[in-house]
Amino acid sequence: MIHFKTLFDLDSLIKKQLDNEIAESKNIELEQRLMIGKLLAEGAYPSILAKLFNKSETTVKRYFKMYNKGGIKALESSKPNGRIGGFAICIKNDNYPVSLEKGKAYQIIFDAQDIKYQLIRVIDESGEDYLYPLDYFIPVSLPLNAAKALVNAE
């Protein structure tokens, strides 16, 4: 079994505040930073989060430092870049030819527990979310209008 050390602990009040901020955020960049912070707190490795959110590992660690210094307010960005994480291209569909189509973009649901075990939760061809091996996908960052179009198409 793989063991992960959490980078900081969230009490239930702070976790609830983060969840609320993520849900109510109108700034995609802030939403990503908050989600990265939450997943780090739950024990996800910075290197895996960097890959999933299409960020450098240095950037992921910088978000962690920003949050530790100034909380949620420190993560606010004055220049949202109009890009959103949460999508990945399927590059492999061994054992799942009906559920996954190679070359297709799928929506990702981020969950630190899944990431710890090198799994990724994907909304597949059935329209439901299921776990698949992380190496079956390449995470991509899409322009906001493309991400919205993919979500609305499904």
Image (cartoon, rainbow, N blue to C red):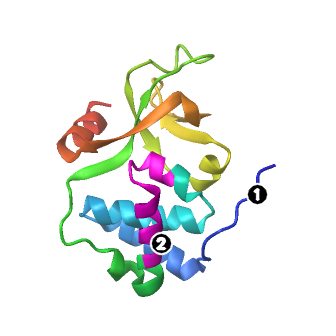
Q: Main secondary structure of the magenta part?
A: helix
Q: Residues within 10 Å of mark 2 (few under 14, many from 20)?
A: many
Which quadrant holds residue 60? bottom left
Q: Is residue 88 left or right of residue 146?
A: right
Q: Amino acid at mark 2?
A: Phe
Q: What segment is highlighted magenta in the picture?
A: 49-65
Residue farthest front in this picture: 58
Which quadrant holds residue 43? bottom right
Q: Is residue 39 above or below residue 16?
A: above
| Gap between marks 2 and 1 measured at Cα | 20 Å
Q: Position of residue 130 (x, y in %)?
A: 57, 35
Q: Residue at x 51, y 80 (%)?
A: 14
Q: Nearer the viewer, residue 147 or 46?
A: 46
Q: Residue at x 48, y 25 (%)?
A: 126
Q: Position of residue 141 (x, y in %)?
A: 32, 44
Q: Nearer the viewer, residue 141 or 47?
A: 47
Residue 28 among magenta residues: no
Identify the residue under disc 2. Answer: 64
Q: Is residue 130 above or below residue 76?
A: above
Q: Are marks 2 and 1 in contact (CB under 8 Å)?
A: no
Identify the residue under disc 1. Answer: 3
- Secondary structure of the residue carrying tag 1 is loop
- Secondary structure of the residue carrying tag 2 is helix
Q: Position of residue 151 (x, y in %)?
A: 30, 38
Residue 57 among magenta residues: yes
Q: Is residue 114 above or below residue 34?
A: above
Q: Residue at x 57, y 36 (%)?
A: 134
Q: Sequence order check: which comes first, mark 2 or mark 1?
A: 1
Q: Amino acid at mark 1?
A: His
Q: Is residue 95 above or below residue 80?
A: above
